[in-house]
Structure formats: C-alpha cells, structure tokens
Image: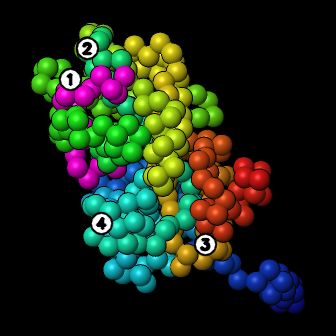
Amino acid sequence: MRNRILTSLAALWAIWITAGPAQAADELSLMAGPFGTGSYALGNAIEQISKKTKGAVGIVASESPGLVFNVRKLGKEPDLKASTFTPYTTGLGYLAVNGMKPFKEKYPPAKLIANYLLGSVWLATFDPDIKSIKDLVGKRVALGRPPQILWTVEPELLLTKGWGLHDKITIERLGTKPAAQALLDGKVDAAIIGGYANVASGEFKPSPQTAELMASGRTLYHIPWGKEAVQKTMDSGVGVNHIAVPKGAVIGLDAPLDGFFDAIAWVAYPEFSDDKAYKLTKMIIDNVGEFKDYHALGKLMAPETLAYGWKAENIHPGALKAYKEAGLVD
C-alpha cells in the first residue's frame, strides 16, 4: 500500500515538473467612462468576460469622469501605462496629439486594442426647407455639451473644416437630450442626432435622444454631411472616416446618408507590452459574441468591426499580431 502511494506521488510530481506551475493571468486595469455611458457598460462587460473565461488576462474596470480625464491622468502618471488601457476615440486622439481644446498640452498617440462602438452623428430638423448644411446659415443648431467629442467637437470640426460655415451658424452647446428637446420646442432649427453602427451587419442603434425624436410623431428631415466635406475634414488630420448610414436606420431616412463615423475604442500606449496587448486582443476576438449578453450595445460588436477604420501603424503591435492571426487584418 505504502509503495503504491509513493508511486502515485512520484507520478504526480513528474507531471508537475513536466507541465510546470500554472501561469497567473496578467492583471490589467481599465479606466472606463462615467456611469450610465456605453463605455462604462461595455467596460463592465469586458471585466466580467475576463473573469468568466479565466484566461490569460484578468481585468478590473473602474468608473472614470470621462475619456479626456483618462488621457490626462495617464499623461501625469506614466507608470500606469504599463498595465492600463482606456476608452478613446480617433477624434479625441486628434485633439490630444495636437494639444487642442479641451487639452492644454500635447499627448503622445495611443494605439488601438479594439473598437467597441462606431459612432455616427448628423443634424436633423423639422423644417423641410433645410436640405443641406448651407441652408443652416443664419440659423440655430443645438449640439451636445462642449467636452463631448462625437456629439459636439467633431460636428463643429465638420462645419469648420468641411463646410467653412462655422462662424455663420449659431451653435448652442446644450447636451444631447436638451438639444433634442430644444428642437421639439422650436427653440433651434436643427439638432444633433445619431447612434452606433455595426458595419458588418448594417445594423444601427439610435441613441436615446434620437429615439425620442423619432417617437414624437413629427416628420424628421436628415441633413447629410456630404462625402466632400467629410473628406476635407479627414484631410485636415481629424481622425474620422466615411460612412453611409443605412436607409431606414432611423425614421425619415429614406436613402443612405453620407456622413462620418468615429471609432470608439479601447487603446493602450507603447508602455503596454506587446504580450499583454496580444493576450487582451485575442480574448476580445475569441469572445466578441459574448458582449451582447451584458449590454444591448454589445450586439453591435463583431469580429469585422474590432479594427475597422484603423491603419495598421496605429494598431498596437501586440494587437496587430492577434488580428493577423485571426485573419481580420492583412
């Protein structure tokens, strides 16, 4: 009996020696967005997925005041960059790298880990005579709050760099919901609306205030940015890209709308090792279908959207390796 026990212990020891001790998962921090935002919700989702899969990375997501705050904090505390990734947008990157408002200094460019949303916004009106951005000259337009990149900063850049009409239009920076209400109350001539797209499936999810306008029972007219204006804005260095919002995405959209999208993504800085970036990105690719179980916006995530709109040189090298292995990037 004693010999049998010793033999079994020896066999187990041999297996342990051969296999080696189990490797602990890399512990990563995610600075998510404010509570109630898509960034916060999907940040919580990726944390739960990392726990569920018990894979090569373990993620702890924490609420933050917002994306601008995250860039500033990582700039002031560079030691955090080795284990931290954060929500980001290509438009935000343009402002940060160039030291433009709301930033007071220049910040290094971040590198893509994975897109989680593709946001697209445009202007809408109840006035059937407003068919083009040019028709807004001398009129009032309601946008989001001043710090909001997608809902305020980028539309203003389109009006300035794409159309050259920013100083000829009265801009009111109210916030997304107040902007919609101002349009309903007749206090402005047009307001910012939009939502989030899955370019692989063509699915589009309107934002809450857009859905509110759609439910008003009034005829909503949509004002395209136009391919030429989007291209001019892109040529100026702003990190947006072309999109045709699909017909029927929102009520009153009877044909595809020429607009722009901003990739809303998780990014990391070069201090974040290639190995960590590879493991994190591979986990996202392998489990992208799970995000829908945690939030409705997760339904818009698909393998084809994770690196959509990014040039290879702007993708973190470790993430790029994972995308190439999965056949998602050439």
Pointer 2: what residue?
127
Mark in front: 1 vs 3: 1
Q: In which quarter of the image is residue 114?
A: bottom right
Q: Which x, y percent locates residue 283?
A: 63, 58
Pointer 1: what residue?
189
Amino acid tagged 4:
Phe
Mark 1 and mark 4: Cα distance apart in space: 30 Å
Mark 1 and mark 2: Cα distance apart in space: 7 Å
Pointer 3: what residue?
276
Mark 3 and mark 4: Cα distance apart in space: 28 Å
Query: Above or below — where is 107 with respect to 36?
Result: below
Q: Which x, y percent locates residue 238?
A: 45, 52
Amino acid tagged 3:
Lys
Q: Which x, y percent locates residue 147?
A: 26, 53
Residue located 14% across and 20% down the image? 186
Q: Do the residues labelled 2 and 3 touch (CB within 8 Å)?
A: no
Mark 1 and mark 3: Cα distance apart in space: 49 Å
Whichever of callouts 1 and 3 sits on the residue coming sooner in the sequence is 1
Amino acid tagged 1:
Asp
Tell me, yes or no, if residue 12 can be seen here. no
Mark in front: 3 vs 4: 4
Pointer 4: what residue?
103
Q: What element carries label 1?
A: loop
In the foreground, 152 or 228: 228
Q: Do the residues labelled 1 and 4 touch (CB within 8 Å)?
A: no
Whichever of callouts 2 and 3 sits on the residue coming sooner in the sequence is 2
Residue located 34% across and 40% down the image? 164
Whichever of callouts 2 and 4 sits on the residue coming sooner in the sequence is 4
Q: Which x, y percent locates residue 81?
A: 46, 77
Q: In the visual, does 313 lie left or right of 249?
A: right
Q: Are marks 1 and 2 in contact (CB under 8 Å)?
A: yes
The segment highlighted magenta reads 132-151
